[in-house]
Amino acid sequence: MNYEELYQRKLTTPEEIAKTIESGFECVSPTCMGQPTAIPKAIAERAKRGEIERVSHHSIIALEPAPFLDPELAGKYSYVSWFTQAAARKSVQQGYSDYMPCHYSEEVALWDVRGNPDVFYATVSPMDKHGYFSFGLVASEAVELARRAKYVFLEVNRFMPRVHGSNIIHISEITALCEYDMQINTVPVPVVNERDLTIGKMIAEMIPDGATIQFGIGGVPSAVGMCLNGKKDLGIHTELFTETMIDLIEEGIVTNRRKAINSGKTVAAFAWGSQRMYDFLDDNISIEMAPVSYVNNPYVIGQIDDFISINSCLEVDLLGQVCAESIGSLHFSGSGGQADFVRGCNLSKGGKSFIAMGSTTKQNTASKIKPILTPGAMVTTGKNDVDYIVTEFGVAHLRGKTAGERAKELIAIAHPDFRDELLYEARKMNLLV
């Protein structure tokens, strides 16, 4: 097959691709940098002209510019968030975007319940001589959803890094493609403060040589990475590839040698960071992007001894119920992969999952450890799964502890200004005598 000839036959414009969209279509794209730019814009123009309605765009994280976040297109070309990040927070909170409760590992499987999407579209790197495109920085849901959709449209961007792994698609599998070159979105390296470093040091001390790590985004995971000097033969198996991981690999702290599966390889579902990161990942054979149904699968995680998961949250109650996605009933984030990795660590021999947070909020006027969660708060990690909670005042190990023992441990790591109040409330709840 002459792949270049096939490429030219399928090459068209975003406007021609948009003509395929019918009212009521459900469209889906990979997360973050996998989101195309020109195709959604062309679909939005049709919606503005009144040619289509009830079209939805589904993704884990949306990046701006994103026309489906425009309130004027509500009901015409709207967003369904599967993990509400900053760009979509306003639209979800104000009700002109919807959101999907889910564990990230189950994202693709939930389409079995909904029925497969009509359209899959994505940004990819240029085609190689064998006819393959790389989804680049995103494996996540890309390949699996592309194979479920009725129509598959690609937006080829020469700035998308070509990253190895299970994140490729062949020219023969697509309906049509267009070309649209633009710089890939970057995010600043998280700022690490003294509180983050205090927490990071405590967690790092509990990570043994040979452990495999998963980091979430934010100051605390970055601080943990900064505190791993002297560790040997660590591995990486992570939903999100972070900036700190580059340093750990380049310094020889991460070798991936002792992983029971994917030995010698850093495994991630997607990456989001600096241009330095994108240059590091480009054509780096030691990095493998893999579907989130594999990366976040608790049973896969459980096959890796000494698996260490580090994530964050908004608040915790005295039973250890963790809220990481809402402020009361106000939707703020999403479940993501937190519970996936907590459960995976519980299955891992020597595994530990850490959920870290500063002890206070609102300029130290409110405790993040509470007798009960704020009314309406969404439980992200349940009391039966939670393992370690960490603040700048210490580490509470909750797994295998009674309700009363948990209350004592959590009060001990709360900010001192709130411990008496928490103790009083714990006694009122008959958690403590």
Image (tube, rainbow, N blue to C red):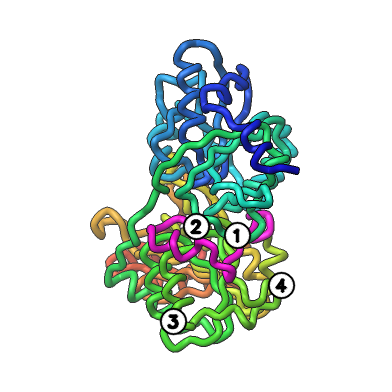
Q: Earlier in the sequence, mark 3 or mark 4?
A: 3
Amino acid, disc 2: Ala
| N-term mark: 3 or 1 | 3
Query: How many C-alpha atoms fall within 10 Å of the one at disc 2: few (<14), some, or many (≥20)?
Result: many
Query: Which numbered disc, 3 or 4, marks the residue closer to the eye?
Result: 3
Q: Mark 1 touching mark 2, by CB under 8 A?
A: yes
The secondary element bearing badge 4 is classed as loop
In the image, residue 365 sits, relative to residue 404, either above or below, namely above
Tally the numbered discs.
4
Q: What residue is disc 4 on? A: 303
Mark 3, residue position: 251
In the figure, 32 relative to 307: above or below? above
Distance between mark 1 and mark 2 Cα atoms: 9 Å
Q: Which mark is residue 306?
A: none
Magenta segment, which residues?
271-295
- Marks 4/1: CA–CA distance: 19 Å
Q: Looking at the picture, which amino acid does disc 1 mark?
A: Met
Q: Residue 271 got which mark?
A: 2
* Residue closer to the observer: 200 or 40: 40
